[in-house]
Amino acid sequence: MMRKLLLIAFMSIVISAIIFLAFLFISAYSRKPSGKKIPYDTHLTYSDYDVMFALLRKMGYMVLIQDYSYEKKNIDCIVIDRAWNKKTFSSFKDWFGKNKRLVVFLDGKLNKKGREIFVKSKNPLLESVDKLSIHTTKNEKELYSPNKIRFESVLKAEGQMIIAKAAYREAEIILICDPYLFADKNMLKAGHAALLNNLFKKYFHKFIVFDRTPLVLEGKKAGEKSKEPQSFITKGHFPYLILQLVLLALVFYLVHYKRFGNILDYQKYKKRSIRNHLQAAANFLFNSGNKEVLKNILDDYFFEKLTRLFPGRKQEELIRELKKRYKNYFSVDLFSKNQSSQLVEIETQRQKFLNIIGKGEDYGKKNGKKKP
């Protein structure tokens, strides 16, 4: 058993090393650098908000991204990225109150070309904002207005809503009709960074929660922009670890259930005598620390053999008689069970005794001994 465990450990180390070196090789040489200098914003897209989160944290904002249910009561500013409808409004209806602000990023069809507009407004949300790149807008009639809430325009372009604002129970609801204002591709522009700061600076010393819960629990729906969260086991190096575990399981299976090398000669071992088999079993039991089991097996074998040599006699009666008759013929007691000492000597004399008695000869005469 110990040899198998050592083999498993050795094979595990070897396979782990091979996989790890292969992983490093692929990571280092699978992509060859082109040698060209690529501008940073070349890889930025309109579908991610990583730069926005990085910028907020860089400015010192306390940002929390919630993928699962959480307690809204003590949060004053929440940002959601989903459709603005009756269901969304109902989920926040009890939360609205004094100094609360709900920012809603509405979905819209992306126009990658976009257009730039110049901003001239005294609204606090547009402070220090002189120019913005816009990609989608909303018609005012498209905006859901629950309980006769009236949305006022903060920023418009050609009569279309870009940013709208409404008050409800002393709380503010701000609709960002163009969510691409804060996409990675635009966040490097001064006007967009200033707008982001204006949106949250009132809550600089408080937690700002980006609520992604519906994206995880409900998945993608019509009219919603959803991005499935990355599975836990696919993050980081977990795929590598999973592959390693599968290979280790394969090694364990091969070591325990498969034979390595040529098939043993069955006929050779079939011809072995019973004594050789017993000796092999005894060696195993003795070396594995099962001495008590070995003694019990040897006792059962000896007394069963005696019973067969003297048929019709009860074992207890036969043992008493043999013990009395051959008491002084042996240096050890052959007829007592569970003897822990002189095991080898006892079994040697027992075997000799059985061989002589089995031939119908008298043990005393055969050994030239006289009973004292």
Image (cartoon, grey):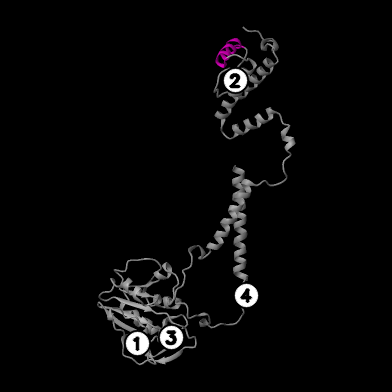
Quadrant location of the C terminus in the rendered image: top right
Rendered location of residue 229, percent (x, y):
46, 69
Q: Nearer the viewer, residue 265 or 2?
A: 265
Rendered location of residue 339, percent (x, y):
55, 22
Question: Dot 3 corresponds to which residue?
Answer: 136
The disc, 1 or 4, on the residue closer to the chain's N-terminal end is 4
Crowding at dot 2, Cα within 10 Å, few <14 / some 14-19 / many 20+, comes out as: some
- Look at the image and say whether residue 155 sits in the magenta stretch: no
Label of residue 126 in the image: 1
Residue 271 lies in what quarter of the image? Answer: top right
Q: Residue furthest top?
A: 372
Of marks 4 and 3, the one in the foreground: 3
Question: Dot 2 corresponds to which residue?
Answer: 303
Question: Dot 4 corresponds to which residue?
Answer: 32
User: Which residue is at 51% across, 65% downward?
Assistant: 236
Crowding at dot 3, Cα within 10 Å, few <14 / some 14-19 / many 20+, comes out as: many
Q: Give the extent of the magenta segment.
A: 314-328
Residue 176 lies in what quarter of the image? Answer: bottom left
Type of amino acid under label 4: Lys
